[in-house]
Image (cartoon, rainbow, N blue to C red):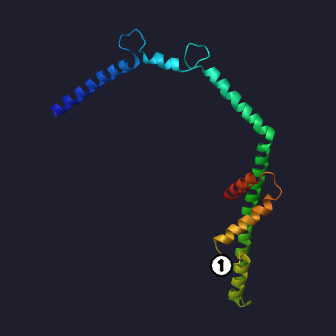
Amino acid sequence: AEFIGRQAILSVVIGTFSSGAAAVALCDDGKGDGGEDDIMKKLKSMIPSSDGDGGFDVNSMVDKVATEVGSKVAEAIETGVPTQLSYGFMSGFCSGYALKKVGKAAAVVLGVGFMALQTLSYSGYVDVDHGKLKKDIEGMMDLNKDGKVDKDDLDKASENILEVLQFGLPAGAGFGAGFVFGLKQG
């Protein structure tokens, strides 16, 4: 245990001195006079500066970036794209949100209606032909008329709804994105 302790102390001492020497070797030529081999001077001379002395001029860089961003924003506003996107997106969001809320309300109404129908059937007031009811409902939901209700019918319904809601809008992509977002939020 004593040997391991000595070895650990020796490793720390050697590591400290060797990293200090490496730092001097990387940043200075070892003479301490800041000669030609001084890495820091080389790095400073490689970075452009407006004052000509080398070094990083933050103010000029910020001015360049702000000018570039400002010109791009002005170009975008002149084309009218941001207003079309925001109008389309907001219209889509509101439509998607409302559709989801109406869908939930319709599910509640249909669910309560089914429970009432089943209660009336159980009590003997009505006879329900569930086979015919199933066939009629599946016929309405089978939009591609392939004889089964599946994901393709859902995709077809989505396409039909978006086609109607996007009709005549200047920014259909914004509407579509907003519609999906509204459905998720509703």
Mark 1 residue type = Lys
Report the residue marked by disc 1.
148
Q: Write the residue at 75% across / 55% down.
A: 92
Above or below, 83 relative to 156? above
162 vs 36: above or below: below
Identify the image quadrant of the N terminus.
top left
How many C-alpha atoms fall within 10 Å of the one at disc 1: few (<14), some, or many (≥20)?
A: some
Tell me residue 139's x, y (percent): 72, 80
Between 79 and 101, the one lying in front of the other is 79
Name the side, left or right, on which 46 lies relative to 136: left
Above or below — where is 115 with respect to 64?
Answer: below
Quadrant position of residue 59: top right
Residue 178: x, y in percent?
72, 53
Q: Residue at x 40, y 8 (%)?
A: 33
Q: Nearer the viewer, residue 124 or 76?
A: 76
Q: Nearer the viewer, residue 102 or 173?
A: 173
Residue found 30% across the figure and 23% down from its top: 18
Taking the image as shown, residue 89 lies to the left or right of residue 25, namely right
Residue extending farthest to the top is: 33
Give the residue at x 80% y 42%. 80
